[in-house]
Amino acid sequence: MDLTTLAAAVLLAFGLLGADAVMHTGSVQLNVAPLPKDAKLSIDKTTLETEFEEQLSEITSVPSVVNPPEIRSTRDEGLGMAIAEALNVQNVAFAVQQQMGYRPDKLRFALFTQNGKLSGLVNGHSHVVGNFQNIIQPTEGEPIFNFVKRCALWSGSQLAPYSTTLYLLQQHSADGNFQDVSALAEHSIQLLPNTPTSADRALFENVLGLLALFKNDAKKAHEEFHKAMTSDPRNPVPFLNAAFTDVQLDKYKEAADRMRTLIRSAPPANRVLLSTAYTTWGAAAMGLKDLKGADRLLAIAHKVNPSSSTTLALWSEERREAGDEKEAAHLNHLAKEAASSFENYAEVATLYFHLAWRDNMPVTRSKFANPGVVTFH
């Protein structure tokens, strides 16, 4: 290769590095090491890499108002870095990317044997916790894929603690064992600077409020949601959840005022959240015995997000309360049909709980949830 061609290739590579830095901001570079030669495993490197990547992606991809990190295997490197490696100037390329402010989170997963026993090494760098490393050992008789998932779960707690918290919340929403959820949320809060406002802290405070609702402690939930509102006044989710607890605590006027202010002052751009605001306001109106007002608000909520089962089911309750049994049955039928559609985000209370518009009602679970992935074998 002559010098002119080489110079052109280098300039092209560095230009593509800049594009890659913009396109993959917030990504995680994943590397899975080759399998140890002395390990008797019924799995090859490609399968191991794919399984670990898919498990990590599942953990960090719970539907949320916060964008999850992009998991990128080293086999998915950018074109600019590929050219730099071909020219044997990858060290310079890494330096150029760092100068551009591009330093992706990195994760490496390796299986190894020591004294005849299998272990997993997870290490890397996260912008949240800095450098991390952990050696994880399988339990007696633990299947290899379960072990890989456990390693991926710990990795997620380092790379994306909020997404992992939401994943654990949804995994344990049925059995109510939230010890790991609470521990990860509280630990993450402790790592954050104690500033008056913090968007990150608000996310975890909001989760702690949800945990209180799972324990039927609406007052504690109300306190946590208010902390989150103070920590990040720009995030509409804690305001929605605070209004939910207002309704739960029979403070219907407070809930209505809160949602009226939110919609008029800072309406959520996200249609699901905006619909949730109108639905919650409608529940507050039902609590205030204003069925006409509730009917109007729920009609708006349905128009904003026609696929919300929560809105349709509550609207059915309102029509039944007004004595319109035929329309109530129709709306209830539509609610069941919409149950196969996306319902709400993992940090929103109405995904898990019913809006208690009658006085002195305990916290009860919603009949609707986000649909799972269905596969046929």
Image: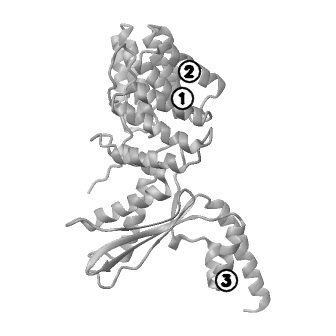
> Amino acid under label 1?
Phe
Residue 17 in view in this figure:
no
* Crowding at mark 2 (Cα within 10 Å: few <14, some 14-19, many 20+): some
* Percent x, y of residue 12: 73, 75
| Foreground residue among 320 and 148 | 148
Q: Are marks 2 and 1 in contact (CB under 8 Å)?
A: yes
Q: Say which label, 2 or 1, has the lower sequence index.
A: 1
The numbered mark, 3 or 1, whose residue comes first in the sequence reads: 3
At horizontal 27% and vertical 81% (from top left) the residue drawn is 115
Disc 3/disc 2 C-alpha distance (Å): 58 Å
| Residue that label 3 marks | 89
Q: Which residue is mark 1?
A: 239
Q: Are marks 3 and 2 in contact (CB under 8 Å)?
A: no
Image color mode: one colour
**Residue carrying label 2:** 258
Q: Amino acid at mark 2?
A: Arg
Identified at 56% across, 48% down, the residue is 192
Q: Residue at x 50, y 68 (%)?
A: 124
Gap between marks 3 and 1 measured at Cα: 51 Å
> In this picture, is 184 found above or below 77?
above
Say what secondary structure mark 2 lies in.
helix
Can residue 332 be seen in this snapshot? yes
Q: Nearer the viewer, residue 332 or 143?
A: 143
Tell me how far mark 2 sits from mark 1, CA to CA: 7 Å
Residue 102: quarter of image: bottom right
Q: Is residue 200 above or below residue 314?
A: below
Q: Position of residue 14 (x, y in %)?
A: 72, 74
Q: Nearer the viewer, residue 59 or 363?
A: 363
Where is the C terminus found, in terms of image quarters?
Answer: bottom left
